Image (cartoon, grey):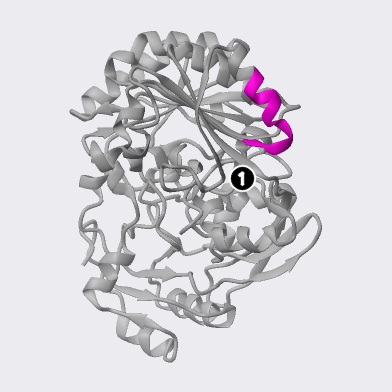
């Protein structure tokens, strides 16, 4: 039973009501489905330990999903939606027990057109990408966890990914055409949210409806080259990275800058990157490669690895070594290291990164993802530091803020506390409409902020929506 509370849900009556729909109360299966990748955070690893559901339900289509939601609402049993469990924040850990709704079977491509795809929410991203490439297309920015993640899981819990250097994030207008959600009511409804209205379901961890379908714009599927470029000085790598990220005429997919000794932490890079060298990782299309190589030479860098997408000597696609995914690679050899999530926006982006670097580099080597938000190239990163205590982490947050960075809380587990979701009265009204009894992922995003669960520690972090726009 869940450690936050031990409610006496009428599980027998609920299970009778969903007879014929796959479900289990097996403790081992429940433990697996009640967790995601939150263990990358030493704080969440402790705070979420022992939080489990009472039953796992796995509907196979929208009709079964409707029966499950209707029965759960009638019996007032909370529902936590879970797809592949690839999230880092513990979003799919049930804080108040009840039902874990496994949506992996709710998958399939509905339609592929020249400029868009319509797809069921539980569709695996990598399988979708493979099918799109048959049509010469790809998603604008799949997650780094594409091999296991689902389309709706990325939208409900993520922000961007490889491709965000060019197309921005889910927050940027035009990156989603529509999404359809099922309401948490005794008579569930399907609501189609089009254009800007789709933001009502974005980054709410399933607390504002169960996403059943999405319609997404597509990008051309270029022939991509993975590249690792070495520099003797971290700030030289940053300067090159910022220039490359902002070079709109060059066809690139991502730009990720990592200070030495980060390359030495990753097994696949240890024989590629010379000692003492910081790196820029990127993907460049064939038509831009010659110019890119010239830019590298003129900037004083050295290309230490070039490979077709997914064929590099490091054993997996290069996009699995950027964003939050890089921490997984580091923790294979250095489980004591973690990071926080700083954001860097300035007309002098290089200068801002240099100020923060000078302030916090003693904690560990800095990483910097360069992406586009609101049309402007910004940075996302922090040191990879050896965790000692929440107090140590809080001190580093303050020092980054003093230097001009904005810091969100990647070591909390609800929407407001993480700080990446812009929450307006319209969002609150929509939450009331789709979840009138507060049964969807309770504690993660409540109508009244004081009812959000106090999971993990409160660091002195910022609200991203207030500072980054």
Q: Quadrant of residue 114?
A: bottom right
Inspect this view and state whether residue 200 appears.
yes
Rendered residue at 36%/10% (across/down):
359
Q: Please provide the residue range marked out in magenta.
A: 284-294
Q: Looking at the image, how many numbered discs can be counted on the residues?
A: 1
> Which of the two residues, 444 or 349, is positioned nearer the viewer here?
349
Badge 1: residue crowd in 10 Å (few <14, some 14–19, many ≥20): many
Q: Is residue 195 magenta?
A: no
Rendered residue at 66%/19% (across/down):
294
> Which of the two residues, 142 or 71, is positioned nearer the viewer here?
142
Residue 175: image location, x then y, percent? 69, 46
Q: Quadrant of residue 284?
A: top right
Q: Is residue 285 magenta?
A: yes
Residue 350: image location, x then y, percent? 54, 12
Outermost residue toward the left in this view: 388
Q: Quadrant of residue 1?
A: bottom left
Question: Magenta span: helix, strand or loop, mainly?
Answer: helix
Q: Which residue is tagged 1?
A: 141
> Which of the two residues, 1 or 127, is positioned nearer the viewer here?
127
Rendered residue at 44%/91% (across/down):
20
């Amino acid at each position: 039973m869940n450690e936050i509370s031990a409610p006496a849900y009428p599980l027998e009556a609920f299970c009778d009501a969903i007879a014929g729909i796959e479900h289990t109360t097996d403790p081992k299966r429940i433990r697996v489905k009640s967790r995601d990748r939150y263990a990358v955070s030493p704080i969440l690893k402790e705070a979420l330990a022992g939080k489990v559901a009472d039953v796992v339900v796995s509907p196979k289509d929208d009709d079964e999903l409707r029966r499950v939601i209707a029965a759960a609402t009638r019996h007032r049993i909370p529902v936590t939606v879970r797809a592949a469990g690839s999230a880092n924040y513990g979003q799919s850990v049930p804080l108040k027990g009840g039902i874990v709704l496994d949506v992996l079977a709710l998958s399939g491509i509905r339609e592929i057109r020249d400029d868009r795809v319509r797809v069921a929410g539980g569709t695996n991203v990598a399988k979708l990408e493979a099918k799109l490439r048959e049509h010469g297309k790809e998603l604008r920015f799949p997650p780094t966890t594409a091999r296991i993640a689902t389309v709706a899981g990325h939208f409900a819990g993520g922000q961007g990914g490889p491709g965000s250097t060019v197309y921005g994030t889910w927050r940027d207008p035009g990156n989603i055409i529509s999404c359809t959600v099922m309401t948490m009511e005794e008579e569930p409804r399907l609501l189609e949210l089009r254009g800007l209205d789709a933001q009502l379901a974005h980054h709410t961890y399933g607390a504002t409806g169960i996403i059943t379908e999405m319609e997404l714009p597509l990008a051309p599927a270029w022939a991509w080259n993975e590249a690792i470029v070495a520099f003797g000085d971290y700030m030289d790598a940053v300067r090159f990275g910022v220039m490359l990220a902002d070079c709109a005429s060059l066809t690139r997919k991502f730009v990720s800058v990592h200070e030495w000794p980060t390359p030495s932490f990753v097994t696949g890079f240890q024989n590629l990157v010379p000692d003492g060298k910081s790196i820029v990782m990127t993907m460049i299309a064939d038509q831009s490669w010659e110019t890119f190589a010239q830019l590298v030479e003129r900037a004083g860098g050295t290309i230490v690895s070039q490979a077709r997408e997914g064929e590099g000597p490091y054993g997996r696609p290069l996009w699995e070594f950027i964003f939050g995914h890089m921490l997984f690679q580091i923790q294979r050899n250095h489980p004591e290291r973690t990071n926080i999530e700083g954001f860097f926006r300035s007309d002098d982006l290089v200068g801002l990164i240099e100020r923060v670097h000078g302030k916090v580099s003693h904690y560990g080597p800095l990483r910097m993802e360069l992406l586009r938000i609101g049309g402007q190239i910004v940075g996302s990163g922090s040191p990879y530091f050896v965790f000692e205590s929440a107090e140590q982490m809080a001190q580093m947050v303050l020092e980054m803020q003093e230097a001009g960075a904005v810091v969100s809380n990647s070591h909390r587990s609800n929407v407001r506390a993480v700080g990446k979701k812009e929450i307006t009265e319209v969002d609150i009204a929509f939450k009331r409409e789709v979840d009138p009894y507060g049964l969807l992922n309770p504690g993660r995003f409540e109508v009244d902020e004081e009812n959000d669960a106090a999971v993990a520690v409160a660091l002195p972090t910022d609200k991203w929506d207030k500072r980054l726009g």
